[in-house]
Image (cartoon, grey):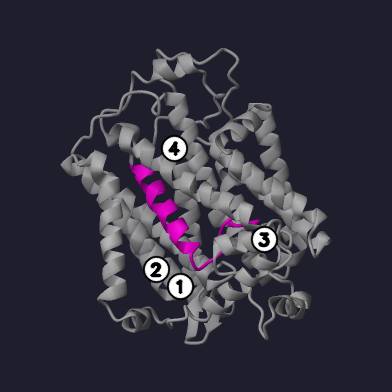
């Protein structure tokens, strides 16, 4: 098993590789093929693949650090604050070195062509130092955002889809099992005090972060259970059940809703593969979703629905935060107040943030990814962020229409859940965020593999009524 480091293919390679494709999902063993078919020759100048085991370990460690698990573990021995930043700097250096060593500058050209808005918003965050209300904090956090983006890009470009599945499996397993143990055996680390009592936050910074990790893991292992051979399903089923339990115990209503929507989308796309409704499934999803939303709003007692979720009609105070965030956006609609200068305030900045918001309270973040981008970087950047999210979702759907694959199915469900979660949580363009890294890295890995194999330019793969 080796990491996929082939350079970006030319059109001739794509046309040649389009002639070969797996016959069923099992031929791809969950993922997209890692290499070009024999008749689609790679150029002699292609760099050699690096040993994948060492790379996987580095990436798993980086993702665990992004999720907060490493810092939580180090905090137990009073080393978290001392080693957190040096670890991040080492991760950024590894990411940049990996990209330059194996891709030269080709990865920059590829990003500008296929991820221009991602680059533009990230560059805008760095440039906002010039007009930020707190330039030093904006500079620090924008450096971390650039470094976080480098990590996501390096993971997406350097790892094969097979290696990426291995990385996700181990990362999710460690976060779930470690989080459950911490929540049960070390409540001072794994529990968060809430208005309703206690909620699990595992080894992560807060319960909502742990909840979305559990939601993502539940979707991941749902697809593995559907796609794997019967003899291999027990491991995935156990982890899927643990993920569901952790999601419930996190008491994160946003993550529960996001997971439910993502699971429905996964099952509908998967069912389309079984019953040969491949070409109309997107329309079905939209129609069913619209009908369900209409019924929820007009036919069901909204208060009862929110009571079930343990929330109030004002989204547990989020509506006040949204109003304050929008008021900030109206004050500086074009450029915002500077990346990282408003939200996630340091302890000494809490009063200043409350004064800026015109409230008697402070908030960790805007509880809406798009409003957060708008208030810090302006409405044009928020519009670009919407386009980024749409692209993250449309690309795997387009690929699934041509080549049904379990990994692509998971990415569709994950990106749907990611978009839904950003309605009441802020996960877009967040520095040192595990969920942002995962969303970007998976989308890049899928697109690169599809381009290398010519799957987006070739004929669509016939839909087969089998998950295996």
Quarter in which the C terminus is drawn: top left
Depth check, mark 4 against mark 3: the one in front is: 3
Label 2 sits on residue: 256
Q: Position of residue 73 (x, y in %)?
A: 63, 66
Q: Which residue is mark 3?
A: 333
Q: For mark 4, what is the residue?
A: 162
Say which label, 2 or 4, has the lower sequence index: 4
Marks 2 and 4 sit apart, C-alpha to C-alpha, by 28 Å
Question: Which label's residue is closer to the chain start, 2 or 3?
Answer: 2
Residue 150, by quadrant, is: top right
Q: Secondary structure at mark 4?
A: helix
- Horizontal placement of 220 versus 273: left or right? right
Q: Earlier in the sequence, mark 1 or mark 4?
A: 4
Dot in front, 3 or 1:
3
SS label for mark 1: loop
Q: Are marks 2 and 4 in contact (CB under 8 Å)?
A: no
Looking at the image, residue 167 lies above or below residue 47: below
Instruction: Say whether residue 94 is visible.
Output: yes
Identify the magenta region: 406-433
Residue 84 counted in the magenta span: no
**Mark 3, other Cα within 10 Å: few <14 / some 14–19 / many ≥20:** some
Q: Residue 387 location in percent, x, y? A: 52, 47
Mark drawn on residue 252: 1
- Label 1 neighbourhood size at 10 Å, few (<14), some (14-19), many (20+)? many
Query: Does the CB distance between marks 2 and 1 fall below 8 Å?
Result: yes
Q: CA distance from mark 2 to mark 1?
A: 6 Å
Q: Secondary structure at mark 3?
A: loop
Of the numbered discs 3 and 1, the one sitting upstream in the chain is 1
| Left or right of 358, for residue 305 | left
**Crowdedness near tag 4: few (<14), some (14–19) or many (≥20) residues, C-alpha within 10 Å:** many
Observer-nearest residue: 327 or 221?
327
């Amino acid at each position: 098993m080796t990491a996929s480091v082939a350079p970006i293919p030319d059109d001739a390679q794509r046309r040649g590789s389009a002639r070969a494709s797996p016959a069923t999902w099992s031929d791809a063993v969950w993922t997209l093929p890692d290499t070009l078919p024999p008749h689609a020759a790679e150029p002699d100048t292609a760099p050699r693949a690096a040993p994948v085991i060492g790379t996987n370990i580095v990436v798993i460690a980086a993702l665990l650090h992004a999720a907060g698990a490493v810092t939580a573990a180090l905090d137990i021995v009073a080393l978290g604050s001392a080693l957190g930043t040096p670890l991040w700097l080492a991760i950024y250096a590894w990411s940049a070195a990996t990209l330059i060593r194996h891709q030269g500058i080709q990865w920059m050209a590829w990003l500008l062509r296929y991820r221009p808005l991602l680059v533009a918003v990230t560059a805008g965050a760095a440039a906002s130092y010039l007009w930020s209300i707190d330039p030093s904090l904006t500079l620090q956090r924008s450096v971390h955002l650039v470094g976080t983006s480098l990590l996501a890009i390096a993971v997406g470009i350097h790892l094969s889809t097979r290696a990426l599945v291995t990385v996700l499996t181990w990362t999710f397993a460690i976060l779930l099992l470690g989080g459950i143990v911490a929540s049960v055996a070390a409540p001072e680390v794994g529990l968060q005090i809430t208005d309703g009592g206690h909620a699990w936050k595992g080894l992560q910074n807060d319960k909502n972060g742990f909840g979305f990790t559990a939601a993502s893991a539940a979707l991941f292992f749902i697809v593995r259970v559907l796609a794997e051979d019967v003899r291999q399903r027990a491991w995935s089923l156990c982890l899927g059940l643990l993920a569901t339990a952790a999601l419930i115990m996190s008491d994160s209503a946003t993550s529960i809703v996001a997971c439910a929507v993502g699971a429905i989308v996964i099952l509908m796309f998967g069912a389309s593969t079984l019953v040969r409704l491949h070409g109309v499934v997107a329309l079905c999803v939209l129609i069913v979703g619209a009908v369900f939303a209409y019924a929820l709003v007009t036919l069901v007692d909204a208060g009862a629905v929110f009571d079930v979720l343990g929330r109030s009609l004002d989204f547990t105070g989020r509506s006040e935060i949204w109003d304050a965030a929008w008021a900030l956006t109206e004050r500086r609609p074009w450029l915002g107040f500077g990346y990282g200068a408003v939200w996630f305030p340091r302890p000494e900045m809490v009063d200043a943030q409350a004064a800026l918001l015109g409230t008697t309270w402070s908030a960790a973040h805007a509880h809406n990814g798009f409003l957060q981008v708008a208030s810090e970087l302006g409405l044009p950047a928020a519009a670009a962020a919407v386009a980024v999210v749409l692209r993250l979702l449309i690309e795997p759907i387009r690929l699934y229409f041509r080549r049904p694959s379990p990994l692509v199915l998971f990415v569709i469900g994950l990106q749907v859940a990611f978009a839904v979660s950003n309605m009441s949580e802020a996960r877009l363009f967040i520095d040192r965020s595990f969920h942002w890294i995962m969303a970007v890295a998976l989308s890049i890995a899928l697109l690169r593999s599809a381009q290398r194999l010519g799957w987006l330019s070739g004929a669509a793969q016939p839909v087969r009524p089998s998950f295996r």
